[in-house]
Image (spheres, rainbow, N blue to C red):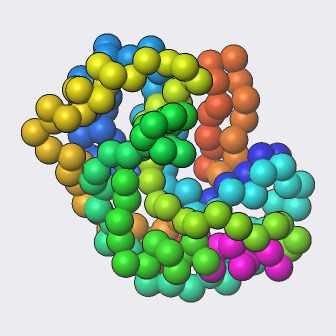
Amino acid sequence: MRLFTAIAIPEEVCQRLTELVARLGPTAPVAWSPAGNWHITTKFLGEWADVAGVAQELAAVRTPAIEVAVRGLGWFPNPHRPRSLFAGAAGEGLAELHQQTDAACARRGVASETKRYTPHLTLARIPAGTPVEELRRAISELDTVDYGRFRAGSFWLYESRAEARGSVYYKIKEFPLG
């Protein structure tokens, strides 16, 4: 199974992001992520068979609930050759949750992260060579880049399945924070 851990995004934040995507959508031929796939990843496990073992380790993660702000837009890996557009996520405790989920998974043999953790929600994937000038212009004309705040009281273990309509994410198990 292809697994990751993440914080789910509440409906009110999804609604604001849906409005943003509707406004930006016509400006570039990119692959917009469906609202049902939006989340803030804390740990990507990749292909992993021992779901029960990982879930057991994740159940031991102890961090307080996190006040999350979804704001700002950015480009991965950089603005000069973007491969994805994202909304930023900020909140005291996100880095700690990432570290603890990474350590919990490492106890089951999952490789630890080597890249710097940048909490975000992927809004679009951008094929190489796609013109994004009009998208950049539309972003520069936005009235706000604040998409809401919420209290994350849990995180989830998800499965990612490749389906005909693209990747679909399924919640496997919820883990409380606090």
> Is residue 36 in sight in this rendering?
no
Is residue 177 visible to the viewer in this orientation of the structure? Answer: yes
- Residue at screen point 43% across, 78% down: 93
Position of residue 165 relative to residue 17, above or below, is above
Total number of numbered discs in the rendering:
0
Whole-percent x and y of residue 155? 53, 65
Q: In this view, does 66 lie to the left or right of 117?
A: left
Q: Is residue 52 above or below residue 145?
A: below
Establish if 123 lies above or below 64. Answer: above
Between 89 and 148, the one lying in front of the other is: 89
Apparent side of residue 178 relative to residue 16 in the rendered image (left or right): right
| Residue at x-position 49% and y-position 61% | 118
Horizontal and vertical percent for residue 13?
Answer: 29, 47
Which quadrant of the figure has residue 90? bottom left
- Considering depth in this image, is 155 or 47 the residue closer to the camera? 47
Specify the principal SS of the magenta part: helix
Q: In this view, does 168 lie to the left or right of 67?
A: right
Q: Quadrant of residue 35?
A: top left
Q: Which residue is drawn at 69% across and 41% down?
A: 160
- Magenta region: which residues? 100-107
Looking at the image, which residue is at 78% across and 51% down?
46
Q: Where is residue 115 in the image (x, y as percent from the top left)?
A: 64, 63
- Residue that protrudes farthest toward the left in the picture: 143
User: Which residue is at the far front?
Assistant: 80
